[in-house]
Image (cartoon, coloured by chain):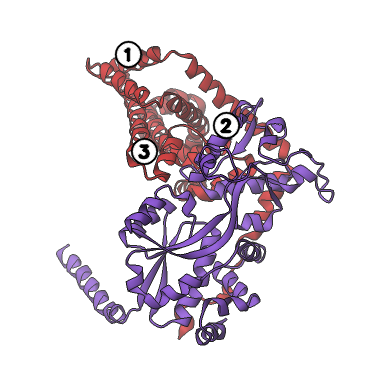
Amino acid sequence: MNSKLKNVLLLLVMVLICTMPAQAFAKTEIVVTDNGWDSQKLHNEIARIIVENAYDGYVLKTSTASSTMNWQAIIAGDVDLDIESWTDNVATYPKDVANGDIVDVGVLAPDSNQGFYVPRYVIEGDAKRGIKPMAPGLKTVKDLAGYHKVFPDDEDKDKGRIYGSIPGWMADEVLHKKYELYGLNKNYNYVRLGSEATLFASLVAAYNLGEAWVGYCYEPTWVSGKLDLVLLQDEPYDKELFEKGATAFPSQQLKIVSSKYFAKKAPDLLEFFKKYRTGSRLIAEALAYLDEKKVSHSEAAKWLLKTHGDLLDQWLPKEKAERVRAVL
Amino acid sequence: MEYLFKFPESLRIGNGEAIDIAVKAFSRNHRETLGLIKSAIIASINSINTLLEAIPWPLLILLVAYMGWKVSKKPYVGPMYAAMLFFIGMCGLWENMLETISMVIVAVFLSVMMGFPLGIIVAMSKRTSAVVRPILDLMQTMPAFVYLVPAVILFSPGKTPALIATTIYAVVPMVRMTNLGIIHVDKEMVEAASAFGSTKMQLLSKVQIPQAMPAIMAGLNQTIMMAMSMVVTCALIGANGLGMEILLATNRTEMGKALMPGISIVIVAIILDRLTQGLIKKEASTE
């Protein structure tokens, strides 16, 4: 028993010694959040290509966790960056920025949308798939009140079903208030699914069968890139009324935020992240490519940088852009 | 040398796209059958839920307290259980608890209905055992998320996929413990029964199953615990109840708020555990 223990210890020491040189010459690790959704993964991979090729001495790592856990990790400084941050969905964001725990680096995408979506065939029908329009007059969220029979809830036959956002997101709180404010609670059940994977699975399942579906979705995602969805209209955005659920979501800015230590840790990278900017349509295009061709996020990132060659010039000085081009 | 350390890319197989397509096609082609299964499951869960909701809460608390006292024979257990349930009500989680319990009841019922006979069959034949055991291992270790999404595609989110996921997880101990219990029945007892000319069915119903009862009851108890432990996972696919409250709170990093439903789950689990454990002991003492 004792000699066995000794052997194991010896082995451990050997392994440590062998890996030490590698540790000593390691590059600076830049840790970015991976909260589990596709557009963020894609943005991370694009950043990886640039950080690891255009600059020397950096390697990009991802921290996979839920968005709230990762947010705490950025505040603590364990994670450096959230490249695609839905700051409007983070309740404590204004306070954290004011305290200096979170630093705004730049705006990644200026034009993201969220709200209640329906597949286009629900309103217009789809002759190719033999689907007749189910709710031809449906344009706004308020119109939903008259269409609860179109979106039946199998578990409660008399009511319709609206899929809310992910529990705990700001969007979910606002939508739930809206659901009560607009009187949709009379005829609808508000169903929350615990994760995006299952929320999108429910949408894909309904789309696959050509059934009606109404619920929360956002752009850019692979879903909005691949399926033909319509955002239901709502009252124009107003800051105070919005929190009561009375208006549409503002067209959100997706931000790049960092920990307070990042600027010191990698000042040269900060220049890039300030300029790093994509857009809803661009990312939806890449995500649809990813889903269609079944390629990895990093391959989709390469594909996007290749097909939109001007992006690199917008983000990087000329000589660095060339270095990235060389590896594509 | 590199090919020795890097698995060759040419040997890679696809990403399972064929399975995606097959699942989607299956859900399109078997809508009616799937719809039937779904409405049966929903109806059974809902009817148990209505039944539980029809019991006035003081009565339910008294009932549990009485059973606790009856089973444990200790005077302080009844009031303790009553206080624990009362605490759940004070947290505002009474309805959520009933919803969770009705799911657990249906899942446990299904697990027993399937697991008990399967356990007997596995105990009877070595060949079935060789096939079933790795499948049981798979059911216990396969991360629930892998089959949650296809279940959602087939049954749309809600109680149905949640129940299926719970049952997949909870049926395993029932099969295992039934199987073990029957295998470990005293050989001489079985031989004696055979010598007196009992048929296989008589042997099973009069000797093996009664002898294996403590193990089977332990299996039932484990099944209940497993079903309870799945409630948070089930909240991910739209099954309401205590799990959803936890999810809502943890996603907002409201640790305190998550603690209440967390404790409630523990309370429900403890009470269910002690009550079934008590039944096992009773069973054993009457032997």
A296 w.r.t. B167: above or below: below
What residue did someone put label 2 on? A181
Question: Residue A223: percent from the left, percent from the top?
Answer: 63, 54
Q: Secondary structure at mark 3?
A: helix
Which chain wears red?
B
- Position of residue B226 relative to residue B199, above or below, is below
In this view, the residue farthest toward the left is A2
Q: Secondary structure at mark 1?
A: helix
For residue B258, the mark is 3
Instruction: Kindly indicate which chain is depicted in purple in the rendered structure.
Output: A
**Looking at the image, can residue B40 be seen?**
yes
Q: Position of residue A298 (x, y in %)?
A: 54, 71
Q: Residue at x 62, y 28 (%)?
A: B40
Question: Image quarter for residue B153?
Answer: top right
| Residue A246: percent from left, percent from top | 58, 38
Amino acid tagged 1: Tyr
The chain to which mark 3 is attached is: B
| Residue nearest the viewer, comparing B33 with B282 | B33
Judging from the image, mark 1 belongs to the subunit labelled B
B252 or B243: nearer the viewer: B252
Q: Quadrant of the C terminus of chain A?
A: bottom right
Gap between marks 2 and 3 measured at Cα: 27 Å
- The residue at which mark 1 appears reads as B66
Give residue B103's position: percent from left, percent from top: 49, 30
Position of A16 with respect to B28 (left or right) is left
Q: Is residue B279 in sight in this rendering? A: no
Residue for point 42% across, 27% down: B97
Tally of numbered discs: 3
Callout 1 crowding tier (Cα within 10 Å): few <14, some 14–19, many ≥20: some
Query: Left or right: A327 with respect to A91?
Result: right
Q: Residues within 10 Å of mark 2 (few under 14, many from 20)?
A: some
**In the drawing, does residue B79 fall left or right of residue B182?**
left
